[in-house]
Amino acid sequence: MKKAAIMLPANQRHHPESDAQQQAIIALLERFAPDEGYNLTTLSDVRFLRSNRPLASTPVLYDPGIVIVCQGQKRGFFGGQVYRYDARHYLAVSVPVPFTMETDASEREPLLAIYMHLDFELAAEVMLQIDTFGDVPTTTPRGMISTPMEAHLQTSVWRFLDAMSRPLDAAILGPALVREIYFHVLTGAQGPSMRAALAMQGQFGKVARALRCIHAAYQEDLDVGQLAQRAGMSIATFHTHFKAVTGTSPMQYLKSTRLHQARLLMVRNGMTAAAASARVGYESPSQFSREFKRLFGRTPVAEVRRMKAGFAIPPAQAAATFVSSH
């Protein structure tokens, strides 16, 4: 079976070593991700993903992280834009954002990807080292960015996967190679925006504080006034900047977060819809069912049946990002 190779920028496509390197990346990921869904690694923040089937438009909520697709394609629809992440583009998410996603994959050519949950401490450490050299470009921070894969980042990905194939190398070199990938992301095309987001600069940083509050206490009775106060803004200003970062209003974001978390509880923990709705902060099961169907297009029972029949269920460690695994 012939594998799809990465399409590099035009000025790099004549290098045969790039194609060979990409074939090696795909071969390694096929070994590391034999099962659909998340395949855990010896590094707690790194997982290898596999999907053997396409996925139609589905609401998802991504945790902050880096997604490097090496075969197949994903498309995210957010804020009126389309974000491609495939063998030519990687995705970086600096704050949790709800959006709609599609996946291209098949049994013959499965989607193979690397997911790195964002280690804020590591990212901050690398950023500080970069800043010591000065003259760092600035830009408006964005919650989600998709940009072309640079040749040096592809090389680092290959070296990382090669090291992960040997237990001793994985234990000793793996963390250093993750750091190398962070360096290339933070100094590449996505660097200025992602670094600004991670530094919590300006209005973006204030919204990010409110987002952390939502994800820590989504089951509580939060309102816009509380969130605006946490962000240090007036309600009107907070609403405007919150929508610019997340593509939705604060209350819609809170509702989406609760519904995604409820879906996780039903799929992974076997909770009933009534129990899950109460756990995430709904007082009315009927209201929960109506809003769940509005978001996912199915009743809670039908959606759980679809998820269990169609996708591998990740272990507990991966639960926070289950909705992004396909």
Image: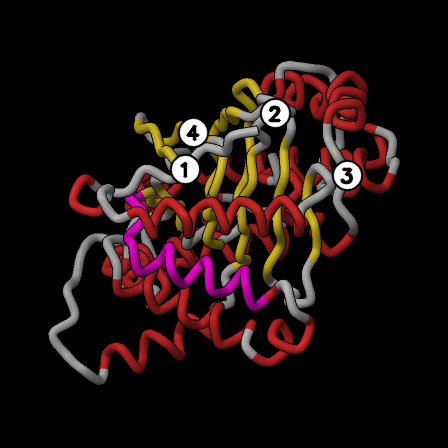
Instruction: Tell me, yes or no, whether the highlighted magenta stretch contains residue 323.
Output: no
Q: Mark 4 — residue?
A: 75
- Local packing at callout 2 (Cα closer than 10 Å; few below 14, some 14-19, many 20+) is few
Q: CA distance from mark 3 to mark 1?
A: 29 Å
Q: Mark 3 — residue?
A: 313
Task: Judge from the rendering whether residue 271 lies leftward or rightward of residue 247; answer left or right.
Answer: right
Image x and y of residue 203, in percent:
28, 56
> Which dot marks residue 201?
none
Which residue is more in the foreground, 165 or 42?
165
Task: Judge from the rendering whether residue 305 lies leftward or rightward of residue 321; answer left or right.
Answer: right
Task: Judge from the rendering whether residue 113 lies leftward or rightward of residue 30; answer left or right.
Answer: left
Magenta region, residue range: 147-163
| Mark found first going from the N terminus, 3 or 2 | 2
What is the three-letter code of the residue carrying label 2?
A: Arg
Q: CA distance from mark 3 to mark 2?
A: 22 Å
| Mark found first going from the N terminus, 3 or 1 | 1
Q: Mark 2 — residue?
A: 108
Secondary element at image label 3: loop
Secondary element at image label 4: strand
Which residue is more in the foreground, 269 or 5?
5
Which residue is more in the foreground, 241 or 247?
247
What is the three-letter code of the residue carrying label 3?
A: Ile
Q: Mark 1 — residue?
A: 5
Q: CA distance from mark 2 to mark 1?
A: 14 Å
Image x and y of residue 32, in percent:
66, 51
Name the front one of labels 1 and 4. 1
What is the three-letter code of the residue carrying label 1?
A: Ala
Secondary element at image label 1: loop
